[in-house]
Image: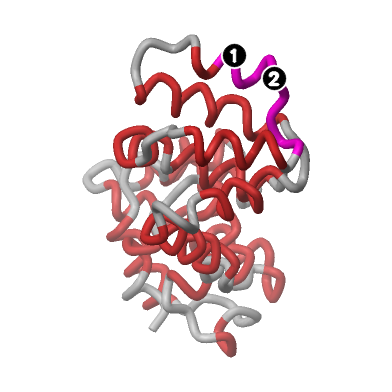
């Protein structure tokens, strides 16, 4: 079964187990289409409640090859058309474009990416970073000694320490110190894009 279909069935597991009746129509159709075997039917029938029967069917389906999802959807057509429609709609949504890139989520215009961040950019960024700032600067290539120096030279505020580190990075790397490179380190440190939305405008 296609990984995205497996994922869909897993994400809808509780919904399906509550909404669907594992009547003979569904499992007999799947048996007729050679998706379920006789031993599968016995396994499903041996469960004590409809919910457990449905969960057992959902355990079995992903192991039954490429055709299993398609035939499961078809088995719902007669008695559960609204569930069939919902699953197909979720499937289509999953096929749509992937989520926007980190740079797009941060609201950074493309023409800024290859440029060196301005002092204003760095100042805004320093104001946004908190405990993650050291991992960002280490990822940018500064050493622990550099970070110690930033802290020693600017003992009063974290913002000043961060700004000193960012300025040190741009001075050392010149034109290689681009916004794009900075964003890579911010992404690596799991900084949420929402934090960065006003930084590079």
SS majority, magenta: helix
Q: Identify the residue under disc 1.
A: 42
Disc 2 versus disc 1: distance between alpha carbons? 6 Å
Number of disc labels: 2
Tell me if mark 2 has few (under 14), some (14-19) or many (20+) residues whose alpha carbon lies within 10 angstroms of its own: few
Quarter of image, res 83: bottom left
Give the x, y percent position of residue 32: 70, 39
Q: Residues within 10 Å of mark 1 (few under 14, many from 20)?
A: few
Q: How is the image coloured?
A: secondary structure
Q: Is residue 57 above or below residue 116?
A: above
Q: Position of residue 140 (x, y in %)?
A: 61, 52
Check if mark 2's residue and mark 1's residue have beta carbons within 8 Å: yes
- Relative to 175, is 15 above or below? above
Residue 39 against residue 21 in the figure, above or below: above
Circle on res. 38: 2
Label 1's element? helix
Residue 170 appears in the picture as rendered: no
The magenta segment? 34-43
């Amino acid at each position: 079964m296609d990984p995205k279909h497996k994922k869909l069935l897993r994400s809808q597991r509780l919904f399906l187990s509550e909404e669907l009746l594992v009547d003979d129509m569904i499992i007999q159709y799947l048996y007729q289409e050679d998706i379920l075997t006789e031993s599968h039917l016995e396994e499903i029938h041996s469960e004590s409640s409809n919910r457990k029967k449905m969960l057992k069917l959902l355990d079995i389906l992903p192991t039954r090859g490429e055709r299993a999802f398609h035939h499961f959807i078809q088995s719902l057509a007669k008695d559960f058309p609204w569930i069939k429609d919902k699953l197909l709609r979720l499937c289509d949504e999953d096929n749509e474009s992937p989520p926007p890139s980190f740079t797009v989520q941060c609201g950074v215009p493309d023409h800024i990416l290859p440029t060196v961040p301005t002092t204003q950019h760095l100042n805004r960024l320093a104001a946004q970073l908190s405990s993650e700032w050291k991992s960002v600067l280490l990822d940018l290539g500064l050493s622990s000694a550099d970070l110690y120096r930033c802290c020693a030279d600017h003992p009063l505020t974290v913002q000043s320490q961060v700004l000193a580190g960012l300025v040190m990075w741009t001075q050392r790397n010149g034109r290689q110190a681009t916004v794009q490179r900075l964003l890579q380190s911010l992404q690596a440190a799991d900084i949420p894009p929402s934090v960065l939305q006003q930084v590079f405008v």
